[in-house]
Amino acid sequence: MLITGGTPSSANYHVHHELAHTLFMRVTEIFHSIQGESTFAGLPCVFVRLTGCPLRCTWCDTEYAFFGGTEQSIEDILGRVRSYGCPLVEVTGGEPLAQAETTALLHRLCRDGFTVLLETSGAIDTSTVDPSVRIILDVKCPGSGMTDRMHWPNVERLRPQDEVKFVIQDRIDYEWAKDILHQFHLTDRCPVLFSPVFGTLDPRQLAEWLVEDRLGARLQLQLHKHIWAPDTRGV
């Protein structure tokens, strides 16, 4: 397993924000709802769901974001986000970093004073992301079928403001995630989230494993799926 990597250079964060009105991105949806995951769960949040993803996780619940969407300028996206009057914003997908313009969008959101979350698969280098962004890194367990796509230096550069998430399908995933947690000393780096695959792994079972092993990881449920129907979009 690759466990080498460096810290990001500050030079990577200088984006030409004055060109934002000429930069276009493909967007699946922008909506205002309750944050359903992360340590921000339960707070109102604006979601910018970008289109496209190079991964095909077996349990993916947002396949509708793989294709389609509409072309929108970064200025238009920012205008829509501002219209909700909500200080918390999450850029998600799909895989948001699959679009090169995402780093410019993230920078502009940070510059405008938002608290910015980035939900990313961990398969694409995060070193160019504005340092003010709170990265939520989804480490792909074996059950996802995408473990070989992980870019492990992303795990090494996690900071206290970031979070790392493991989506757990079964006991095999759980034991694998435990090994990664210990190998990278993740509980010393940032909050660690263990989330059961909805409808596949009983949350009670995962809770019992976490209690028994005293991992220092947080059980995460997808709150929005317990409030609305699991396949409801725009929530």
Image (cartoon, helix red, strand yellow):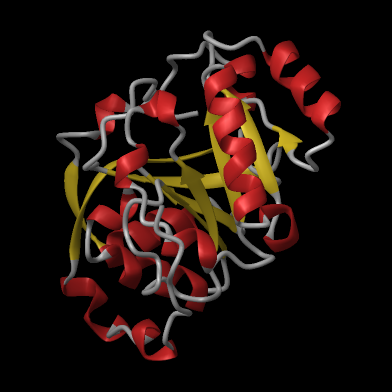
Instruction: Judge whether residue 34 can be spotted in this image.
Output: no
Between 148 and 56, which is closer to the camera in this rendering?
148
Q: Quadrant of residue 93?
A: top left
| Residue toward you, 33 or 207 | 207
Direction bottom: furthest residue: 11
109 left or right, relative to 57: right
x then y, percent, for residue 71: 16, 51
**Which residue is at 39% across, 54% downward?**
80
Residue 42 on image: x %, y %: 71, 37
Corner quadrant of residue 98: bottom left
Q: Depth check: 232 or 6 in front?
A: 6
Q: Is residue 99 left or right of residue 147?
A: left
Residue at the front extreme of this rendering: 1
Q: Residue at x 74, y 40 (%)?
A: 217
Where does residue 149 sit, x and y in percent of width and height? Answer: 30, 45
The image position of residue 104, as x and y in percent, is 32, 72
Q: Which of 2 and 51 is in front in this view?
A: 2
Number of numbered discs: 0
**Rendering quarter of residue 62:** top left
Can residue 76 be seen here? The reply is yes
Q: Would you place residue 29 above or below residue 117 in this image?
A: above
- Looking at the image, residue 111 lies above or below residue 125: below
Q: Is residue 163 left or right of residue 51?
A: right
Up/down of 220 relative to 197, above or below? below
> Residue at the spot x=30%, y=67% of the render?
75
